[in-house]
């Protein structure tokens, strides 16, 4: 086995352990337990004899596995419940219903499932407890357009936003104000019941109002903010007329804004983070050290255009190779976050594959180096890959097959290139989602 092949295997093994640490079942069980009739959720105790009924609702790529853990704890105590997850991410549950729906674009299945979920939320009364399970992907899966917006129009807006390269916080600022359930509005449906939400975070800084567009969290943004995002980035004219009309009504006060921090509906609401990117990176660090590498966690907040972030990773690789900084070789530099891609081409790929390809363009001059970028949800963009591996020999191997890496990058077409090289990361649905993991290995 040559050295690059060995480094590739180390990178895959380290990523595998990062995934294991993000398992939603374990994440929920760390923060959710029942003892002698008292349900401990985070730092809050709920005496179950004080509640008449327990309902469960939720949405996100990890919501079905989170529900699996919840059932292990509560067993037959749940009155009714439903979670919505991405197609292919479902689980077989005993008491709770699971609905699968489209992601990243909402579909009719998500629309119907969200209507069912709202009906359950509306059933909850003052003496009931509602448990909510939220993870990344919920923005697309919880779909109930506000006003006269149709599903087709909402999808058109979603496509524009996702192709724009905007940070997810700005994308979700707009999404919240086009919805009947996002931006704290699910908490409105649940009120006056007691509400406890367990959140698996997939956003930088674990901003709870951004994860799945914050359905149970006070919304610090307004219609003015949503309109400003679209105007500032020149996207307002690409929005369907119904959406422009709703936003304008909201700015004028003719449409009720999302509930803010002062709203009474949040007086009996608890939101806690049960899993995040940090846990995955710490597992990666531990595994890399066991494999004889010198690991270092750089950041959990990597953001920005993928092609620009690639230059930073290349600079780090050169520094390790030439100066032994920030750690000496054999080094494993570890980071997490959620880069963005501004779509200019018509190719097939995702942000992690694009980042890996952009890094590959500069690796030929840095011997013995491997870079892995992959999403913990197992789906990088609209592909079946979680991400890809680039290495010192990626360009040479591409040329041998008649491939043009620069052309593939310009066309946002990383998937076919890495597929031809057998360097895609294919995990299948992981049932979790805590942003992306980046590994830079210098042997």
Image (spheres, rainbow, N blue to C red):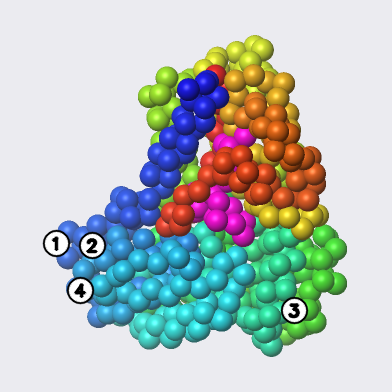
Say above or below: 5 vs 435: above
What residue does disc 4 label?
Answer: 76
Q: Secondary structure at mark 4?
A: helix
Secondary structure beneath disc 2?
helix
What distance separates the C-alpha of mark 4 from that of mark 3?
43 Å
Nearest to N terminus: mark 4 or mark 3: 4
Q: Is residue 5 visible?
A: yes
Q: Nearer the viewer, residue 419 or 392?
A: 419
What percent of the width, then of the height, locates residue 234?
Answer: 85, 63
Name the element at disc 3: helix
Residue named by callout 1: 36
**Which residue is at a point 47% across and 80% down the rendered structure image?**
113
Q: Nearer the viewer, mark 2 or mark 1?
A: 2
Q: Which mark is residue 55?
A: none
Question: Which range of residues does the magenta coloring cover?
Answer: 372-390
Residue picked out by circle 2:
73
| Residue 74 image point, x, y percent | 23, 67
Q: Secondary structure at mark 1?
A: loop
């Amino acid at each position: 086995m040559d050295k690059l092949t060995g480094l590739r295997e180390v990178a895959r093994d380290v990523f595998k352990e990062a995934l294991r640490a993000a398992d939603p079942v374990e994440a929920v069980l760390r923060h959710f337990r029942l003892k002698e009739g008292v349900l401990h959720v985070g730092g809050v105790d709920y005496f179950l004899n004080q509640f008449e009924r327990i309902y469960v609702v939720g949405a996100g790529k990890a919501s079905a596995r989170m529900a699996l853990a919840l059932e292990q704890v509560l067993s037959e105590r749940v009155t009714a419940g439903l979670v919505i997850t991405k197609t292919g991410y479902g689980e077989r549950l005993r008491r709770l219903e699971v609905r699968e729906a489209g992601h990243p674009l909402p579909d009719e299945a998500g629309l119907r499932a969200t209507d069912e979920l709202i009906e359950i939320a509306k059933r909850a009364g003052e003496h009931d407890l509602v448990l909510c399970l939220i993870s990344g992907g919920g923005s697309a899966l919880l779909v109930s357009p506000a006003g006269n917006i149709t599903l087709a129009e909402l999808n058109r807006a979603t496509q524009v936003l996702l192709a724009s390269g905007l940070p997810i916080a700005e994308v979700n600022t707009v999404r919240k104000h086009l919805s009947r359930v996002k931006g704290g509005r699910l908490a409105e449906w649940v009120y006056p019941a007691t509400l406890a939400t367990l959140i698996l975070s997939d956003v930088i800084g674990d901003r709870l109002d951004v994860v799945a567009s914050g359905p149970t969290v006070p919304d610090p943004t307004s219609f003015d903010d949503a309109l400003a995002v679209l105007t500032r980035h020149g996207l307002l004219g690409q929005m369907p007329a119904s959406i422009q009309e709703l936003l304008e009504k909201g700015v004028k006060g003719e449409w009720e804004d999302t509930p803010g921090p002062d709203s009474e509906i949040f007086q009996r609401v608890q939101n806690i983070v049960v899993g995040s990117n940090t846990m995955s990176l710490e597992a990666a660090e531990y595994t890399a050290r066991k494999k004889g590498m010198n690991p270092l966690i750089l950041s959990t907040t990597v953001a920005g255009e993928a092609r620009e972030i690639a230059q930073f990773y290349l600079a780090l690789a050169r520094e390790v190779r030439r100066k032994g900084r920030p750690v000496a070789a054999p080094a494993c530099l570890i980071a997490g976050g959620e880069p963005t891609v501004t779509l200019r081409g018509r190719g097939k790929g995702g942000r992690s594959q694009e980042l890996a390809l952009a890094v590959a363009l500069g690796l030929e001059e840095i011997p013995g180096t491997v870079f892995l970028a992959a999403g913990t949800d197992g789906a990088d963009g609209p592909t079946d890959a979680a991400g890809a591996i680039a290495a010192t020999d990626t360009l040479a191997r591409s040329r041998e097959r008649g491939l043009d890496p620069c052309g593939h990058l310009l066309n946002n077409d990383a998937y076919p290139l890495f597929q031809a090289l057998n360097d895609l990361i294919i995990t299948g649905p992981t049932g979790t989602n805590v942003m992306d993991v980046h590994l830079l290995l210098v042997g």
